[in-house]
Image (cartoon, grey):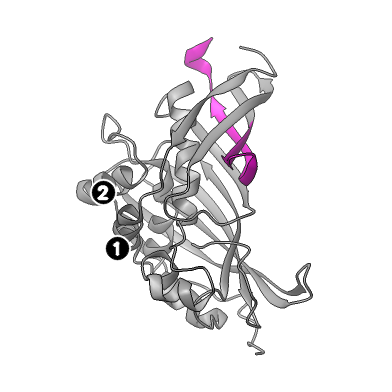
Amino acid sequence: MTVVSPLGYRFPGGTYTIAHWENWLLTDCTTAEPLPDDLAHPVALFHVPILGAGTSITTLFEVCGAEGPGSVGLDGYDWEYMRPLRIGVEYRMEGGIVRWEQLVDERGNPYDSMSFSIEMFDAEGLAARITNTWRFRRRKIEDVTGETS
Amino acid sequence: MKVGDQLPEFAVPSVDPARMKTMAAVLRDPYRVHWDREATREMGLEGRVINQGPLNLSYIVNMLHSFSGPTSVRRLTVSFGRPVFDTDSVVAGGEISAIDGDRATCAVWLKRGDEIVVSGAAVIDIAHLH
């Protein structure tokens, strides 16, 4: 399957405020106790920028031509925190797809490697920045080599 | 504190598939491999669901929090080498690789037995630990 390169695709942008309930559930999923002082668990830096930028995992899968179970893999994250994330703070997001490469894995299977970056601002300025890299496999393979999201 | 010091480990004795379902809802993650055993049967994985990458990373974050506190994490740069499945036993660990003033860089990892499934580096604020 050949997908039109989404390089340069910009997310609509928007804002997001982490709710107490979602941070509580998220933190519970990590097997940890809630953090003090309205601190959000740092792993909120996965879904908060995506949703706050006005996009979604579903949209990213569509734009990049995901083909079903096993077709999407996770390669890496680079997440920077200028200060801790907090519940109840309105963050503004902007970003887009910044890298798209057609590659072949160690078994000879083709895949597209996609990176997207999002910056997250609060009233003081830049609060966090992420770059996530996913792979979109273009042929069924016998086993998986990575997870999402 | 010095370069080469090991960070205290954070263990998850059995990765819980119920938590993956909750995580999928929080993330609005439609990828069936995290919550639908039929999806992973189609992949030849015998119906074991695959833990979300953010959850694998969260165990490393929890390990860092236990060492340097809940406001200490400044940067996480990680690669995901192998999937983690429900009921897997995993352990997060790390080692201080550099110290520069109030910041320490740590090599971090998540292991299943002797196999490294996530690896990378973390920068943490250690000002309050001096």
SS category of the residue bearing label 1: helix
Residue B113 got which mark?
A: none
> Would you identify the image quadrant in which residue A127 lies?
top left
Q: Distance between the residues labelled 1 and 2?
A: 10 Å
Identify the residue at horizontal 47%, vertical 71% (top origin).
Answer: B40
Q: In which quarter of the image is the C terminus of chain B?
A: top right
Q: Indicate the amino acid at tag 2.
A: Leu
Vertical position of residue B24 compared to residue A25: above or below: below
Residue A25 got which mark?
A: 2
- Quick check: B50 left or right of A104? left
Residues at circles 1 and 2 in contact by the CB criterion of under 8 Å:
yes
Which chain is indicated by disc 2? A
Magenta stretch, main secondary structure class: strand
Vertical position of residue B21 compared to residue A24: above or below: below
Location of residue A41 in the rendering, given as x and y in whole percent from the top left corner: 36, 41
Does the image show residue B72?
A: no
Q: Residues within 10 Å of mark 2 (few under 14, many from 20)?
A: some
The number of numbered discs placed on residues in the rendered structure image is 2
Identify the residue at horizontal 49%, vertical 33% (top origin).
Answer: B73
Q: Name the residue under label 1.
A: B25
> Would you identify the image quadrant in which residue A110 lies?
bottom right
What range of the chain is rendered magenta? B107-130
